[in-house]
Image (cartoon, rainbow, N blue to C red):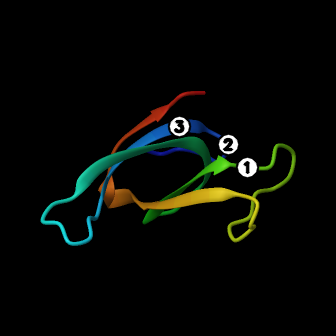
Amino acid sequence: MKVKPGDIVRVAFLDHVEDGDESLPFEVFGRVIKQTKTDTVIGAWLHTEEENEIGDSNIKAWCIVNKAITEINILK
């Protein structure tokens, strides 16, 4: 599913498991920072009025491989 920067979303995805034999489902809630052909980046701890740059130590973001995403819901 296509999303755009600023969308507030719930993303369900399969994550790898160290020392396990199958992936596990997880979910993250947050604001879309960006989406590319291969990845979707979701921020959950972001500045309110500034641009949020990946690598900024004051934000918390997750880069999820699109092929691992099982569902995206736009919440707002």
Q: Which residue is situated farthest in the right direction here?
A: 49
Q: Which residue is situated farthest in the front direction here?
A: 19
Which of the two discs, 3 and 1, labels the residue nearer the N terminus?
3
Residue, disc 1: 46
Relative to 5, residue 53 above or below = below
Q: What numbered label is drawn on residue 35?
A: none
- Which is in the foreground here, disc 3 or disc 1? 1
Residue, disc 3: 9
Residue, disc 2: 6
| Pointer 3 with pointer 1, Cβ within 8 A | no
Q: In x, y percent, where is residue 52?
A: 76, 57
Q: Residue at x 67, y 42 (%)?
A: 6
Residue 20 located left or right of residue 33: left
Q: Quadrant of the C terminus?
A: top right
Q: Residue at x 53, y 59 (%)?
A: 62
Task: Specify the amino acid type for callout 3.
Answer: Val
Separation of marks 2 and 1 at Cα, in angstroms: 11 Å
Residue 64 located left or right of residue 30: left
Which of the two discs, 2 and 1, labels the residue nearer the N terminus?
2
Q: In x, y percent, where is residue 15?
A: 31, 59
Tag 3's secondary structure? strand
Relative to 2, residue 15 above or below = below
Q: Residue at x 12, y 65 (%)?
A: 21
Mark 1 packing: few (<14 Cα in 10 Å), some, or many (20+)?
some
Can residue 35 be seen here? The reply is: no
Tag 2's secondary structure? loop
Tag 1's secondary structure? loop
Mark 3 packing: few (<14 Cα in 10 Å), some, or many (20+)?
some
